[in-house]
Amino acid sequence: IYPEYTGNGAFFFDETKSDVWNNAQKGWARVKELDFAANNIVWLKSAPANNTWAIAIPGELARKEGIRSLEDFSDYVNRGGYVKLAGSEEFVT
């Protein structure tokens, strides 16, 4: 058994522009179909998980700077606010 994110199928099979990946069930069905046809790999039932990306900041900073959205965060950064961002490569490149 090898766990994998359904959305990675978009990259594995060069289908990143397809709208199918915007829907979890349709994306799972598509990668299941593609991986079986190409590699004879059977995808099992998907796990009840969500891999949504997010940015977290300290509550004190959010209150002090009035940051309530990514747009607010962007404004804070663009006016010179200090930020140290840590994340995996696919998120920051």
Image (tube, rainbow, N blue to C red):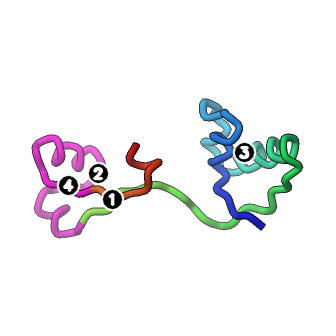
- Which residue was labeled with disc 3? 26
Q: Closer to the N terminus: mark 3 or mark 4?
A: 3
Image coordinates for residue 39, horizontal then vertical, percent? 84, 46
Label 3 secondary element: helix
Residue beneath the point at 84% across and 53% down: 41
For the residue pair 8 and 27, the one nearer the viewer reads as 8
User: Which residue is drawn at the image coordinates 16% and 56% (left, top)?
Assistant: 66
Q: Which residue is mark 1?
A: 86
Locate residue 16, reporting x and y percent. 61, 34
Residue topped by disc 2: 69
Q: Please, what is the three-letter code of the amino acid marked with disc 2? A: Ser
Q: Earlier in the sequence, mark 1 or mark 2?
A: 2
Marks 1/2: CA–CA distance? 19 Å
Q: Quadrant of the N terminus?
A: bottom right
Closer to us: mark 3 or mark 4?
4
Query: For the residue marked with disc 1, what is the amino acid?
Result: Ala
The kind of secondary structure element at disc 1 is loop
Nearest to the observer: residue 85 or residue 44: 85
